[in-house]
Amino acid sequence: MILLSRSEEIVLLAIWKLEDNAYGVTIREQVSRDTGHEWSFGAIYKPLKKLLHRDFVEKTSSQPCAERGGRSKYLYALTPEGEKALRTIRKIYKSIWTEDCESAFD
Amino acid sequence: MGSRTDTIPGLGKALLWLLLDEEDYHQVVGDFEESYRYRIKTQGKTRAILWFWFILFKSLPGFIWDSIYWRGIMIKNYFKIALRIIKRQKLYSFLNIVGLAVSLTCSFLIFLHVRNELSYETNFPKANRLYRIQTNSKYGSTFRNWGASAPALGPILEETFPEVEKTVRIRDLGREILSYQPPQGTAKRFEERGGFISDSSIISMLDLQFLSGDPLTALEKPNMVVLTESIAKKYFADEDPIGKILLNENNKRPFQITGVIRDMPHNTHLKIDYLISMASFASIIGNAEMLNHRTWKAVYTYVLLHPDQTADSFDAKVPGFMKSFHADYPGRQEEILLQPIRKIHLHSKLEGEIGANSDIAYVYIFSGTALLLLLIAAVNFVNLSTAQSFKRMKEIGIRKVVGARRGQVIKQYLGESLLITALSAGFTLILLYLLLPFYTQMTGKEIAFGNIVHAQNILFLLCMMGFLSLLAGFYPAFFASGFQPVNTLKTIRDPRSSTTRLRKGLVIFQFVISIFMIFSTITIYRQLVFFHNQDLGFDKDKLVALRLYGEFRRDILSNTDALKTEILRHSAVSHVALSSNLPGSSMSNERLTPVSVADKSSLPMLRFMRVDKDFIEAAGLEIVLGRNFDRASDQKGAYIIAESVAEVLHLEQPLGVECRSDVHGEVEPIVGVIKDFHFASLHNRIEPLVLEYRPNWTGYLLVKVESGRSGEVIEFLRQKFDEVAPDHLFSYVFLDEYFNRNYEIENRSYSLFRIFSMIALLVACLGLFGLTVYAAEIRVKEIGIRKVLGASVPSITVLMSKEFILWVIIANLIAWPAAYLAMNRWLANFAFRVHIHAWTFAFSAASVILFALVTVSYQAIRAAVSNPVASLRYE
């Protein structure tokens, strides 16, 4: 079984939260908001490509839009495999973060 | 749609394009652009641009990692192909790499030199606030711009100007002979040139680092001296010098050593070896009042401004200040200005500089040369790789058929040029390592290889590499990536395409540069020969000058005749004379006032030299009027003036005119007039010179020696001196060598230029050679058919080489006017100069054509004598 890396997990969750408006710009903003520091595009695209490669997300091309200088954008969405991967990671967290640990590090 | 101003910077786009594949590129640029526009709207343009570059650079590691991770196989393939091509095309790769490495090496050495020139005084932490006082004076119709200023000035400036934090006065001691007498053994005696009398403020102004001694008191009292580390080592080896006594042999004055400082950095105009306290000044001069003198240019005054002050506000107050400063000297026309010390080395040519300075013009010339060398090598690269890409048409065709986009081919080509430049950068390092000793010898600057491996230098080399690989790889990349796959696979070879014209243009360009440089080298060389051979109006070639000092000088001057007859006894010696200065050094600035003139402030400054009765004959000067000095009748002093002096003083009958001296105030007659002669370098016009009969004021013994016998005479003189004064340091110079030191900058530039112009020509010929090889390959069948049909070897050789030679001739026509104009401008620096002869044109053309001919004809003849069977057999 392939586990998600931390950055992949963060990006994947951001895409899920953004529902049908997940693309480069919004993902970067979401991730930066979630973690509290600014991520570069390089830092977004690296996990994003891996997620695509493993079929955890899929992309669809949009209409060209003016604010991107007439370029189209790829919208990302979770695949069932992606959701499964998130569930797996959640299960693992639960088992490693016992109640003792959580109260100790909160 | 958005206007052009709200798209992201093009350079950033190009960077992204290089790193990302096509699909990602559009996405990422889209993302960047959207966020960028949002930021322009909310935060303004500048912050948006800053944000863009910040995020871009933060993104780079991710993108680079990505491109290697996802495109690893392709990169491996590109690399393999590139290495195969380098291996298969041995000749082309060799020419490319060698050409690039040689020019990179040269431009790197030039970079080192230029960086050193520009780094003067930067080792002083307060350099940006330090200024030297320049004094501009007007005397009648003559101007003198002095680097030196009056001793009273510094302290008064410090009191009057709120801008000034501190000042220091330093006085150059010139050559002195110092000695140290250890408790046991013999005295150590050396001639020193780096001595200065200085205020103690120099310690904090230049942040001198004390190794021992107390910086606060080291220059406080009279007769204290602070030595640099290397001077201390010279006299005291491993002993502790503090408290010991150094003796000035000239005046038998003892100095107590109160401190040892670190050696001065090599890149400063203040070549300080030892410092003597200013409190000693009065006793050395013999008159304490002289420290308050307001017109005597005796010291250099350096000023430290407060951190928040500018030179402008200082300059604005100068006119008012000078009026009160010179209140007791009505009619004196003088102004002072602040000269930043960082500008002294490259921009200053004042009266009485501490040492010879360099010139900013040579910094420009050398930087230009470096750039031209790089261009020549880049042109080779472009020519050879466009020529070569015809051979790679099939590879590119297949790549495109299989799905490569144009961008990928371009990136592949750029990557290859980066690989080649990286290889040549490697060779550059090896070449540097080998060449450094010669370079050190040539420029007189010590550079160790270890010092080269330095962050800034490595960065420079990397930048050069990047610049070159883009410059050289750009055109071939776009050219080769534009091939139509259909054509490439059909083996339609069209050697006469548009690139031929470009290649022609580039080769011509290369040779224009080579011819330009050769032309310049010839002109510089001729000017140098002129410097050395020009008739100066006096005999510099046969004179040996011996320095007299201390008690020995007094002994000799009180009884010159005995020594003179003793020396004249040697059969090779024809004259012995005395003088105060040597021709080629700077002469004293004084005025000569005919007694009939009441107001001397309108009189011009003249140059003065004190001599004895034998000087005119020994130097071979020509008397046009009156007589030579004579001991009996000129007992009380007399003048012999140059013709130009009579002119500037408007003396129609100069003989017998009684004149008063500025310096000692006595009245003496003019007894003779001599022809003007070049007592200073040929850079400048001849200034009016006055010779005064004052044997007691001299310090050099001039001995005229029969040519070819100077060695034996010097031995003879050494013996004689040892007999008379056993403890005397025997120091001599040949006057012609001494005089020619004035041309050191030109000499050095010539030796560098000579090498660089040869290298430019060599690299250009390497490229030309590559192109002829290529042309011969392309035309191999044509030549075969011609030979079968009966063409002779010579006719084919001519056929093959005439085009190239034509290019070189065109290059000559372009280079001549440019070189002529540039060299005329350079020559305008010199008051006395050569004219550019027709044969300079002819010689530069002939040498380049000859080189090109040899390069081309080797390959042309090889093609011509080849057996047509071999070339035609294939079909």
Image: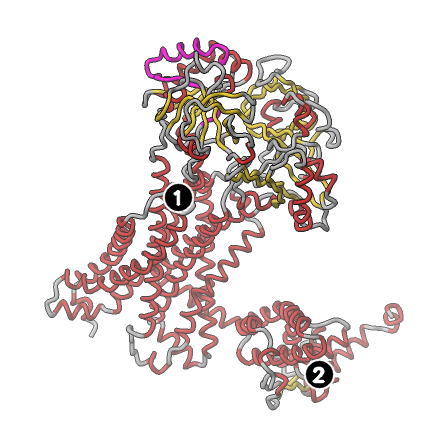
Q: Measured from the top left, where is residue B31 in percent x and y?
A: 63, 79
Q: How many marks?
A: 2
Disc 2 target residue: A15
Q: Is residue B570 magenta?
A: yes
Label 2: which secondary element: helix
Name the image quarter holding the N terminus of chain B: bottom right
Crowd class of label 1 (few under 14; some 14 to 19; many from 20; radius 10 Å): many
* Amino acid bearing label 2: Ile
Q: Chain of mark 1?
A: B
Name the image quarter holding the C terminus of chain B: bottom left
User: Residue at point 36% right, 30% down?
Assistant: B537
- As measured in the structure, the alpha-carbon distance from the residue carrying label 1 to the one carrying label 2 is 69 Å
Is B856 or B510 nearer to us in this picture? B510
Up-down relation of residue B729 to residue B391 (above or below): above
Q: Point out the stretch of residues depicted in magenta.
A: B557-582
User: Residue at point 15% right, 63% down?
Assistant: B795
* Amino acid bearing label 1: Tyr
User: Residue at point 53% right, 18% down?
Assistant: B549
Is B14 or B372 nearer to us in this picture? B372
Q: Measured from the top left, where is residue B533 in percent x and y?
A: 33, 35
Q: Quadrant of residue B868?
A: bottom left
Q: Measured from the top left, where is residue B100 in percent x and y?
A: 41, 57
